[in-house]
Amino acid sequence: MEELNNLMHGFSVALTLPNLGFMVLGITLGILIGVLPGLGGANGIAILLPLTFSMDQTSAIIMLSCIYWGALFGGAITSILFNIPGEPWSVATTFDGFPLAQQGRAGAALTAAFTSSFVGAFFAVLLITFLAPLVAKFALKFGAAEMFAVQMLTFCSFVGMSKEPPAKTLAVMALGFALAAVGMDTVTGTLRMTFGTTELLKGFDFLIAVIGLFGIGEILLTMEEGLAFKGKSAKIQLNVVLQTWKELLRYWKTSIRSVLVGCWMGVTPGGATPASFMAYGLARRGAKDKDSFGKGNIEGVVAPETAAHAAGTSALLPMLTLGIPGSPTAAVLLGGLLIWGLQPGPLLFTEKPDFVWGLIASMYLGNIVGLIVVLTTVPWWAAILRIPFSVIGPVIIVICAIGAYTVHSSIFDVVMMLVFGVFGYLFKKLRYPLAPLVLALVLGDMAESSFRQSMLLSQGSLDIFWANPLVAGLMLLSFTMLLWPIVPALKHYLRGRA
Amino acid sequence: MTKLGKWAGRALVTAIATIGLTGAANAWEPTKPVEFVVPAGTGGGADQMARFIQGVVAKNKLMAQPLVVVNKSGGAGAEGFLEVKGAKGDPHKIIITLSNLFTTPLATGVPFNWRDLTPGAMLALDQFVLWVNADAPYKTAKEYIDDIKAKPANTFKMAGTGSKQEDQIITAMIDKATGKKMTYVPFKGGGDVAVQLVGGHVNSTVNNPIEAEAHWRGGKLRPLCIMDSEKLPYNEKVTATQAWGDIPTCKSAGVPIEYLMLRGVFLAPGVTQEQVDFYVNLFKKVRETPEWADFMKKGAFKQTFMSGKEFADWVGKSEAMHYGLMKDAGFLAK
């Protein structure tokens, strides 16, 4: 068990008093960054990166990766309390987390989210510890066609999610794709749908749309419905954590499935956001009472949070072994590694064992520290809902505006956020589902370029999607997912005929 | 501003003035944080260099005010360039450039030209290397080129960063040299491109040295030739047998291609000569640090430094070259 020895050595590197201090500092900063929508782990780390150049390499990366864990944890807080996803991967958490908060169960939802995050991350770290070389090889198998197959699978596992008429779902999804197409077309290098304006050059950022659609939209709705949070009646129970844990044990199947989805998406690298959507879609499919999803089902919080954290953590693996970042935050960390003179790649594990195993050990410790920090604060976060809306409402709007501004440091984005907010309100009033729009907006761009890259590689032949067992298997799985909702209807029909 | 705020601000300004790093009392100095715009995404070559400079400046206290890196990558960098172009007379905004200084306006028709900015200094030039997978049968650039010539067009696939930018321009130059078209597949970043080659999904790339170094050292990629007029001056072994300096030039291998990418800094239009001088001096000091030397070695950069008229002339020549290359390749905006 060479890995175990290495890991023990890693713990001896990471477990010094200053390093533990950096961990707590990093986690706390990360949670704050995660809570502020738009600031995001990537920006937070980018801002703090230069401060760490004078620090010891191992301590620096420990602190920065702890900011990353903290941001992963913190993203869930505003999603659950105010329906504002602090991070892209928290969008799926709002679907059930926010209804739970409205029912006065914010504490339970937060506990479920934090615990699931921890479980996801923990299994992903185990994967990194023991299977790093193997997994790195697997990641190399992913070319453009395989990437498209993964994105296809995400879409397909999400189909049939909405209770609204399919035509409405289709309409908002198409709108999402259209918005995703604005800006630079990376395949031809020309501008699309910018109409000669410079503001539209950068396209519609997913985060700005989400802050507007969900956050501002929700505020407008609350204003119409009498200026009060529905979750106000929530009692603050200090034993909420233990009670929720009892309940969580029932969802072990969902947890395992979400861990697998997350690890796989993090390594390939599909990223945490698609992973959270896919896990949510799968959890709903696997559940007996499908209709309770979207109305406040704890399982609907467990699935996306587990997957997002597993993906976020395992995304560091391709970064360390191949130098490809699995997420924007990993990309900034990668820049940090290079500046410290550490060249990520297949040799990093042998050339700098102290650093790599110290980092891996800090992942274990950082997540444990993180879990303790966030769980102790659950009652406080839940108590925010007791503040009168007339006080907290404007504060939320200000935080949303700051969040939208920080994405690109652009005032135009704040205006866009407000416009999206009005649309979010209208869509909710007209009962158009927002989730498909968000999914199309976040994945549309990626899926489009993967598809077109595949078409370039194959000279326009669709055969590339059946060219090897991996991509063929993924495509087959996608179509099974797509057609699955028809199966019961078909069965019914056949039985009727017989 | 409150009274206290005013007082604190004044105290800060006084403190900074007293610390006075340059010694010359009259010389211009930034009076507030300087925004360092990167017209590209986080994690890429320009971003890495900007963040590295930010770190060096902070660590060695080369400037009293902080340098803050801001990514403005929209529209292949047009967002960043237009922002600095619009900040007329603002000495607290500088921008690092890559080849998209020329390629973006030419390919997209965005109303921008480098003459809209004030040239600062050239920091270094980035090299391009022709890479193949280590399992490929080609040991030299000539073998690879001969095989391209022997097979039908579009047999070979080249992965690169972005579209109608430097990687695709170089691919077009190789097409011209071989007379056979390669299929160019654009990806988001240089790291992705290198991994596509390691995974065997494409035949070759023209990655910058720093993007592919780890895979070369790990025995996954093989450099065939370097697109410069002379070999690199770095003779420290990277792999067991080879150093950057051992890579032959593409010219000597029968592929007459030379292409270097500018890593330079520009200021907003309408700034004073004094302000330009401050930044030129700042970057001179950055270049003298041992960290910079390490960074250059790691990324196998060409360490050319220019400023003033010499730099402007170089940029003008480079622009004309890009115009010609992009016109030949049919990349110009209609």
Image (cartoon, coloured by chain):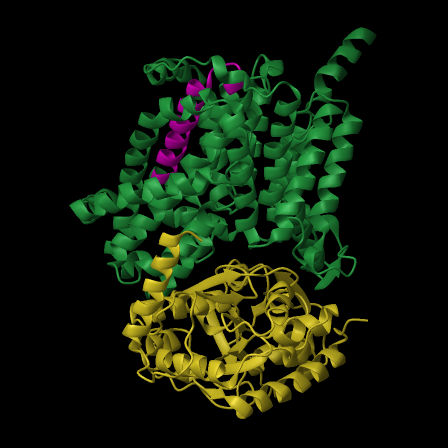
Chain colours: A green, B yellow
Left/right of residue B20 with respect to residue A288 in the rendered view: left
Q: Depth check: A93 or B86 in front?
A: B86
Residue A476 visible here: no
Left/right of residue B207 with respect to residue B295 in the rendered view: right
Q: Position of residue A406 (x, y in %)?
A: 52, 50
User: Quick check: is A308 in the magenta stretch?
Assistant: no
Q: Is residue A126 above or below residue B274?
A: above
Q: Position of residue A345 (x, y in %)?
A: 39, 60
Query: Which of the 4 image quadrants contains residue B324?
Result: bottom right
Q: Is residue A389 above or below residue B258?
A: above
Left/right of residue A6 with respect to residue B167 in the rendered view: left
Image quadrant in which the C terminus of chain B is located: bottom right
Q: Position of residue A216 (x, y in %)?
A: 61, 34
Q: Is residue A156 above or below residue B246?
A: above
Residue at coordinates 59% horizontally, 12% vertically from top-left?
A: A289
Q: Position of residue B165 (x, y in %)?
A: 64, 71
Q: Depth check: A310 or A497 in front?
A: A310
The majority secondary structure of the magenta stretch comes to helix
Residue at coordinates 69% horizontally, 41% vertically from top-left?
A: A419
Residue at coordinates 44% horizontally, 63% vertically from top-left?
A: B68
Magenta extent: A100-125
Q: Depth check: B222 or A468 in front?
A: B222
User: Quick check: is A104 in the magenta stretch?
Assistant: yes
